[in-house]
DNA sequence: AATGAATGAGTTTTCATTCAT
DNA sequence: CATGAATGAAAACTCATTCAT
C-alpha cells in the first residue's frame, strides 16, 4: 500500500516494536505511531484501516521468513532437521523474540474471525510443515532416513515445537527464557522422532551446536 | 464472589457462552450480561471488575477440569494414556468446544501481562503434565512401560497435543472439525511415543475406541 | 422519618462519620451504610432519597447546635463574646471537627441549588448572627459595651470567623490544625472589634482561657 | 496543554460557563463540551483527564487575576485598600460572578483531597493576603497608616471579605445580589479596620465610588 | 507525504433506587 | 425492621477513523 519503500519500512518496524511492547490485544494505532515517530494520520494515509496495516505486517513477516528458510535449504537433511528444531528453542538472548511470538500468538487467535489473517496463518503453516516434509523426503531419498509418513511426521514435529513455544511463552512472567519448555521438547523430538528415523547408526548433531549455528 | 450459587452458575454459563460467541478480545461486559440475561450492573455487583469475573471463571474451569480428571484415574495405564490423547482430538461434534478453546487461547496469551491469569495457566499446565507423568510412572511401575524420562516425555506429549489443537483451531474457519490436525498428531503420538514405550508386545488400544469413550 | 429513635441515632452517626471520612461530594449511600453497619436498603426504608437523609442530618445538626448555644446564654457579655470567638478556633485536637466542617462547607455550597438545604443554612446563619447580636445588645444594655450597630457588627464578626475557618480548612492538607488562620483572626477580632467596643477600661478575657473553657 | 491558543480559549470559556451553569459538583465533561460546542473527545484530546482540565482552568484563572491585580498596584494606599474591599461586594449586575464564585467555593472544598487544587488555592490566598499586606506596608511607609501588624491585619481583612462572600452566595436563592452580606461587611471593615488605621484625620473614600471604579 | 484537530461509537464502572423476601 | 439481589441512567475515558490544511 505504501509507495515510498523507506516509509513503509519505518512503519513496519514501528508495528513490530509496538507489538513487542504492547501485545496485540492492547495495540492501538497511537502506539504504532509513537513507535515509528509518525502521526496516526500518516498510518491511515498509507493503510486504510488498522486491519489493513496489521495484515500487511503479517504478510511481510511471512515473506521475510520464507526468504530466510529458502537460504538454508542446502546442507545434509539430518543437519537441517536438527537446525529446524533448534530454531524454536528460546535462549537467554531471545526476550524480544519471545515478546514478538506472544503478540503473534494473539494475532493467531484472531484467525477464525478474520479471513485475511487466517490466510497468512495457513501460508505459515504450509511453509513450516512443507519445510520439514522436504527435509524428510530428501533424507529418505538420500537413504539416511527410514521411509516414514512424511506429512504426518512433519505435522507432528511442527505441532510439538509450536506447542512448546506457546506454553513457554504464556506460562512465563518477566523473563521467558528462564523456562525450558522449548529446550526440553526439542530434546524430546530428537529422541522420539529423529533418532528412530535414522537408517544407519548415524550420529545426531548436538542441539547446542545447532543452537549456535541458528542464532546469529 | 457470588453468594447465591444459582446466580453464580448462571453468570459463569453466561461467561462461557459469551466467550464462545465473541472470543476473549472482543468480549464486553454487555456481551456477558446479554448472554445470561442479567444487567451489567449485576455482574459488577457480584464481581468488582471484569478481570475479577474472568479470573473467577478461569478458576472455576480449572476446578471442574481437575474434578473430571480425578474421576478417570483408574484403568490400565495404557488405556489411560490413549484416552488422554483422544481427549485432545476434535471430532465433528466439537464445534462449541473449539470456540471455547479458541477463547481460552486468547486468554492464555494474556498470561504474561496478568499474574492472576498466569497463575491459572500454570495450574492447568501442572495438572496436564502431572496427569501424563502419573500415567507413565504407573505404567513403568506395573512393568507395561519401559523406563523413560517421565517428566520430559510428559512435557513432550502435552506440547504436541496443545500445539496440534492450537493449529487446528486457529487455522480453521467456520468449522474447526473439518481439519484433522489433532487427529493426525494423536496418531503420530501413538506411533512415536506410545508404541516405543511398550515393554512387551502389548496391543495399543484403538484411538477411535478411545474417542468414543471420551466424548460422552 | 425514622420511627425507632435508636436506629435513627445510629444512622445519623453513620452520616456524620461518612461525611468526615469521605466528604460530601464523594459521599455514597454505601459509605453511609458501611459506616453504620446497616444496609443501603435500610437507609431507603427510613429516608426515601439520599437528599432526604442529608437534609434530615443537617436539620439535626442545627438542632444540636442551637441547643448547645442556648446552654451558654448566661455569663457576662464580654466573656460570652470571647467564648464565641474561641469556638471557631481549631486546636490540635480538632481534626475530626475540621473534617466535619469541610463536609459541611461542601453541603453549604449546594445551598443555591437546593431549597431545603438553603433553609437550614439560613437557620444557622440567623442563629449565629442572632447570638452575637444578643450578646452585643446585652452588653450595651449593661453599659459594658459602647452603643454600636448591633446587626452590622454581628454580621462582621460572623463573616470573619467563618471566612477564617473556611480558609484554614480548605488550604490545609493532612493536618488542618497546623495552620493558624482561625487563631490569627480570632485575635484580630479581639483587637479590632472587641477592644474598641469596651465602654470602660475593662480587661478582655484571654483567648486561651476561653479556648479551654469551650473545648470540653 | 492545548496548542492552539484559540481552541484553548474556547475550552476555558466553556469550563467557565459550565461551572456557572452547573456548579462544580454536578459538572460533567459533557456539560463542558456542550458549553463550548465541542465533543467530549476533544476535551480529552487536549487534557488527559477531567482533573487536568479543571486544574488548567484554575491555573488560568489565577494567572488572569494576578495580571489584573498588578495593573492596579498604583494609586494611594488608602484608595487601593477601599478598592480592594469594594471588589468583594456583589452588586445587582453580579449574578454571573456569583455563580462562578459558588462553583469556586465547591472546588475549594476539594482542596484537602487534591494537592493540585490546593496548590492553586494557596496561590490565591498568598496573592490576596499579599496584596493587602503590600497596601498596608506602603501606607505605613508613607505615613498615612499607623504601624500595625501587617500580616495579621491582612489575614483578618481577607477572612472577613471571603466569609461575607461565602455567606451571601450560599444563603441566597435565585438572585444572589438581593442579599447585602458583602456590602454590610465591607462597610464594617471600613469602620473597624480602615478608619482606626488612619494616622491623621484623612477622609476615607466612599465605598460607592470605589464600587463604580472597580466594576468596569 | 504528513499532521493536528476533531468526532462518534463504544467500554468499564458507579450509584441511587427498587423489589422480593 | 432489615437485607441481598437487581437495575437504569449516567459518568469518565478510549480509540479507530476522518477532515482540513
Image (cartoon, coloured by chain):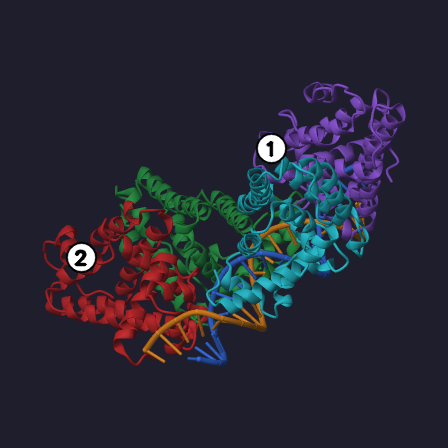
Chain colours: A purple, B cyan, C red, D green, E blue, F orange
For residue C151, above or below residue D85 = below
Side of C105 relative to C203 (left or right)? right
Q: Nearer the viewer, residue D61 or B195?
A: B195
Residue A39 shows in this picture: no
Residue bearing the label numbered 2: C215
Residue at mark 1 shares a chain with residue at mark 2: no
- Where is residue D29 shown, x and y percent of the image? 58, 58
Residue C93 shows in this picture: yes
Q: Nearer the viewer, residue C51 or B165?
A: B165
> Which corner quadrant of the image does residue A120 belong to?
top right
Chain holding disc 1: B
Crowdedness of circle 1 by 10 Å Cα count: few (<14), some, many (20+)? some
**Local secondary structure at mark 2:** loop
> Which corner quadrant of the image does residue A64 belong to?
top right
Look at 77% across and 58% down and name the residue there: B92
In 3D space, how far apart are the residues under numbered discs 1 and 2 (Cα atoms)? 85 Å
Mark 1 touching mark 2, by CB under 8 A?
Answer: no
Q: Which mark is residue A145?
A: none
Q: Nearer the viewer, residue A99 or B89?
A: B89
- Where is residue C135 shown, x and y percent of the image? 18, 67
Crowdedness of circle 2 by 10 Å Cα count: few (<14), some, many (20+)? few
> Which corner quadrant of the image does residue D138 belong to?
top left
Residue bearing the label numbered 1: B147
Single out the mark in the foreground, 1 or 2.
Answer: 1
- Where is residue C77 shown, x and y percent of the image? 14, 64
**Local secondary structure at mark 1:** loop
Chain holding disc 2: C
Amino acid at each position: 500500500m505504501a509507495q515510498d519503500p523507506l516509509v513503509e519500512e519505518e512503519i513496519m518496524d514501528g508495528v513490530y516494536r509496538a507489538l513487542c511492547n504492547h501485545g496485540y490485544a492492547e495495540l492501538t494505532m497511537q502506539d504504532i505511531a509513537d513507535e515509528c515517530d509518525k502521526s496516526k494520520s500518516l498510518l491511515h494515509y498509507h493503510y486504510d484501516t488498522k486491519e489493513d496495516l496489521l495484515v500487511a505486517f503479517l504478510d511481510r513477516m511471512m515473506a521475510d521468513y520464507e526468504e530466510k528458510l529458502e537460504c538454508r535449504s542446502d546442507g545434509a537433511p539430518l543437519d537441517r532437521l536438527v537446525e529446524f528444531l533448534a530454531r524454536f528453542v528460546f535462549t537467554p538472548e531471545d526476550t524480544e523474540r519471545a515478546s514478538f511470538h506472544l503478540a503473534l500468538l494473539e494475532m493467531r487467535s484472531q484467525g477464525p474471525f478474520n479471513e485475511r489473517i487466517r490466510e497468512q496463518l495457513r501460508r505459515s503453516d504450509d511453509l513450516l510443515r512443507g519445510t520439514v516434509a522436504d527435509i524428510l523426503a530428501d533424507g529418505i531419498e538420500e537413504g539416511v532416513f527410514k521411509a516414514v509418513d512424511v506429512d504426518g511426521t512433519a505435522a507432528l514435529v511442527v505441532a510439538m515445537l509450536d506447542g512448546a513455544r506457546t506454553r513457554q511463552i504464556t506460562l512465563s512472567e518477566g523473563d521467558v527464557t528462564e523456562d525450558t519448555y522449548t529446550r526440553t521438547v526439542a530434546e524430546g523430538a530428537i529422541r522420539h522422532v529423529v533418532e528412530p528415523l535414522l537408517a544407519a547408526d548415524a550420529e545426531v548433531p548436538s542441539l547446542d551446536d545447532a543452537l549456535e549455528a541458528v542464532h546469529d
